[in-house]
Structures are given as C-alpha cells and as structure tokens.
Image: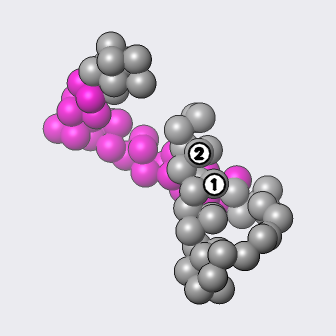
Amino acid sequence: KALALVAAIIHYVLMTFKKHRVAKNETLCGDKIEDACNNITCLIDQVWYDDYHGSKLDKMLREWAKAGM
C-alpha cells in the first residue's frame, strides 16, 4: 500500500507539471491522490495475480527485501 501511495503522489505531481508545463506550487488534492492510489493498487493486483508476471513480481520484491530496499 505504501508503494502505491508514493506512486500515486508522484503521478499527481508529474501530471500537475504536465498540465502547467512549469513547476507550480499546488496543494495535493486528497481525493485525486486516493483515486490514483486505487487505480495503481488495481493495476498492481492485476500483475500480482497473473500466473506469469505475479511470480516474477514476487521474486523481484523478495530480492529487493534481501538487499534492504
């Protein structure tokens, strides 16, 4: 969940930059962040429960955990 939340915040910041074409100080919108987080969580679940990609994701996450990431 934490990874999805961080990804959602990064997505929101990048989309704000894309919209304005300059760095702009904007307050984070909780509803938009929550929507993006839910979408990313859904996509992660699709990968996680896929027979082929799920096992690759699991292996990668275990390697990251061993490396202390």
Q: Amino acid at mark 2?
A: Val
Q: Nearer the viewer, residue 25 or 4?
A: 25
Q: Is residue 30 above or below residue 21?
A: above
Residue 63 located left or right of residue 40 = left
> Quadrant where the N terminus lies?
top right
Q: Is residue 51 visible?
A: no
Q: Is residue 47 magenta?
A: yes
Q: Residue at x 59, y 35 (%)?
A: 2
In the displayed image of the protein, which residue is found farthest to the front? Answer: 23
Quarter of the image for residue 67 reads top left
Could you classify mark 2 by the number of other residues whose Cα lies within 10 Å: few (under 14), some (14-19), or many (20 or more)? few
Is 62 situated above or below 13? Answer: above
Check disc 2 and report its element: helix, strand or loop: helix
Q: Which residues are magenta?
A: 34-60
Whether residue 8 is situated above or below residue 58 in the rendered picture: below
Residue drawn at x 69%, y 57% is: 33
- The residue that mark 1 highlights is 9
- Residue sitting at 33 percent across and 43 percent down? 47
Give the quarter of the image for residue 10. Answer: bottom right
Location of the C terminus by quadrant is top left
Q: Quadrant of residue 52?
A: top left
Mark 1–mark 2 Cα distance, whole angstroms, equals 5 Å
Provide residue 56's location: percent of width, then percent of height: 21, 33
Residue situated in front as seen by the camera: 66 or 53: 66
Determine the residue positioned at 63% across, 65% down. Answer: 13
Residue 32 in the image, given as x and y percentages of width and height: 72, 63
- Indicate whether residue 68 is drawn in magenta: no
Q: Are marks 1 and 2 in contact (CB under 8 Å)?
A: yes
Q: Which residue is mark 2?
A: 6
Q: Amino acid at mark 1?
A: Ile
